[in-house]
Amino acid sequence: MTIDFNSIQDVFSDNQWDVAYLSEENLKRSSSAPIKVKLHVFGHDMTNAIHSISPNGIIVAKYSTDSNDYSLYRDSYDKLLTLFNKEDFSPVYVNFKEASILSGFGVRAKNSLVYNRKFGFQCKFCAYVFRDKITNHKLLKPQHQILDLCEGCDDCIKNCPVNAIHEDWIDAEKCDNFIGYGNDPNISSLKWFWYEKMKPKDITKEEVYQWDSHAKYGKNITWGNGIDGFYELSVEGLMKDKNPVKIPHCRICQEQSKCSKAPFIEKQ
């Protein structure tokens, strides 16, 4: 049997979604591409599974302005269930950035993020494999070049609060440490959000200020009953009373005036 790609597109027809075809080869390539940190694994983990059978599939993007919003996993799965049986497809965890580039509906920018043809940086990605062959899909060309909006522009390099972005490489450790444990008075980090919501009686602000990615902080950042609800981590992100909650997140590298407002023009 075969699946018409147009029927898959119809499932994601509203303006909150974008979808592209992923060949077996590109699924394998995105599975073997390195991943900085594994977070919010949903479905079958194909990373470094070199012997996995990789039938064809799709890469899906959902519009979101929240860096910590992973609700697209459940939302996209529920949408596909309106057309397919659960035995017909499966969510997979791969290097979504690489899959987006190989599929042709995303291109990498200087800030290392992938710029989607429809939503720019304002989206999250997930992927699915299908047992049957997908037909009538568009043949999009992989976007291996740097985002054209980055040519002659170094705004994200100049404005990164921790100087993590360089012309041809990213200091991922600096970036992650700032997002998780930064002390910038104007840009909150995960640890300060946690401290504000959990109000631990046995930990002082002075102690929290000293935490960074090299400190033994892990045992301290635990969720539970907070000052305004019950917090817990799920595959969809941080939840408060079973509902997604937005965590303050540094987004300076994707909010520069040149790249945040201009759409990605697909050149095929």
Image: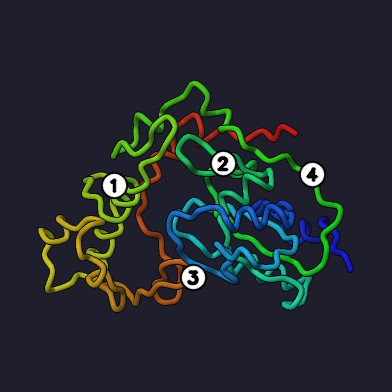
Label whose residue precedes the other's in the sequence (3 or 2): 2
Q: Is residue 113 left or right of residue 241?
A: right
The residue mark sitting in front, 1 or 4, is 4
Q: Which residue is under mark 4?
A: 139
Amino acid type at image mark 3? Val
Q: What colouring style does the render use?
A: rainbow
Q: Nearer the viewer, residue 167 or 118?
A: 167
Q: Is residue 9 left or right of residue 146?
A: right
Label 1, label 2: how far apart the Cα atoms are: 23 Å
Residue 84 position, x and y percent, is 78, 72
Check disc 3: other Cα within 10 Å, few if <14, some if 14-19, many if 20+: some
Q: In this picture, is 75 found above or below 95?
A: below
Label whose residue precedes the other's in the sequence (4 or 3): 4
Label 3, label 2: how far apart the Cα atoms are: 23 Å
The residue mark sitting in front, 1 or 2, is 2
Label 4, label 3: how far apart the Cα atoms are: 32 Å
Q: Which residue is under mark 3?
A: 235
Check disc 4: other Cα within 10 Å, few if <14, some if 14-19, many if 20+: few
State which quarter of the image contains the N terminus: bottom right
Amino acid type at image mark 4? Leu
- The mark found on residue 187 in the picture is 1
Q: In this picture, is 46 found above or below 98?
A: below
Callouts 1 and 2 close, C-beta under 8 Å: no
Element marked by disc 1: loop
Amino acid type at image mark 1? Ile
Label 1, label 4: how far apart the Cα atoms are: 41 Å
Element marked by disc 3: loop
Q: Which residue is under mark 2?
A: 115
Amino acid type at image mark 2? Tyr
Residue 267 position, x and y percent, is 71, 32
Q: Nearer the viewer, residue 41 or 193?
A: 41
State which quarter of the image contains the C terminus: top right
